[in-house]
Image (cartoon, helix red, strand yellow):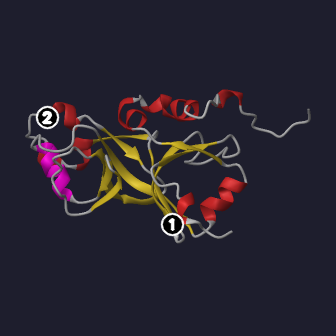
Amino acid sequence: MSFVKSESLRNQFLIATPTLEDGIFKSSVTYICEHDEEGAMGIIINRPSDLKFNDLVKEFEAIETSELNSQPVMVGGPVGLERGFVLHQTPANTIEWLSTLQISPDIALTGSKDILTALGEGQGPDKFLFVLGYAGWGAGQLEQELMENDWLTSPATPEILFSTPYHLRAEAAAKLLGVDLSALATQPGNA
């Protein structure tokens, strides 16, 4: 299967179907950050870890930002769990951070420490997720998984990314397609 640039899933949600019964992708929603002929990269957005922001970044404990320090850290995928990211909205007067991938006009992924400093000083984006790790697919792998009906795709929305409670994100993303996830069969059957 050849890749067609217009078929990029960048800035879309991947919603796991019941065929993904085990592992980190079971019942997951993944926000696709990059997708081209070389593969895809995304962040799982509905897997909070037991960690909080202040568990990872000790120098911000003295800052009076208890809301920031208590933010959960998401498990973004099985790859590079030692690597941290901030998935965030990009306001109109955005500060340029050192390592940022602009995914859409209003959503970006930053992997440099300068955004953490800005957040700690109250100067970062208002809407964000802290993430450890990411999901990755090699060339043609995601396309194959889509053909095997492992995933549904839907347009991404900032509301689901940043405002919907974690445990409701899969259902909310599926509703964008008019799909009730609880009604999807886990086993093929006979009619």
According to the picture, the residue beneath numbered tag 2 turns out to be 65
Residue 167: which disc?
Answer: none
Is disc 2 surrounded by few (<14), some (14 to 19) or many (20+) residues within 10 Å? some
Principal secondary structure, stretch drawn in magenta: helix
- Residue type highlighted by circle 1: Asp
Front position in the image: 140 or 120 = 140
Figure quadrant of residue 2 = bottom right
Q: Nearer the viewer, mark 2 or mark 1?
A: 1
Q: Position of residue 81 (x, y in %)?
A: 40, 57
Could you say where residue 122 lies in the image, as x and y percent from the top left? 11, 40
For this orientation, the residue located farthest to the right is 191
> Secondary structure under badge 2?
loop
- How far is the residue under mark 2 from the one under mark 1? 39 Å
Does 188 sit left or right of 173 as displayed?
Answer: right
**Which residue ends up furthest to the front in the rendered image?**
6
- The range drawn in magenta is 113-120
Q: Secondary structure at mark 1?
A: strand
Specify whether 184 is left or right of 14.
right
Placement of the N terminus among the 4 image quadrants = bottom right
Mark 2 / mark 1, whichever is N-terminal: 1
In the picture, the quarter occupied by the C terminus is: top right
Q: Nearer the viewer, residue 177 or 125?
A: 177
Left or right, 125 with respect to 28, comes to left
Q: Residue at x 55, y 33 (%)?
A: 176
Q: Amino acid at mark 2?
A: Thr
- Is 36 situated above or below 146? below
Residue at the spot 66% in from the left edge and 46% down from the top edge: 20
* CB within 8 Å, label 2 to label 1: no
Disc 1 packing (10 Å; few <14; some 14–19; many ≥20)? some
Q: Which residue is mark 1?
A: 36
- Residue 185 percent across, percent down from the top left: 76, 34
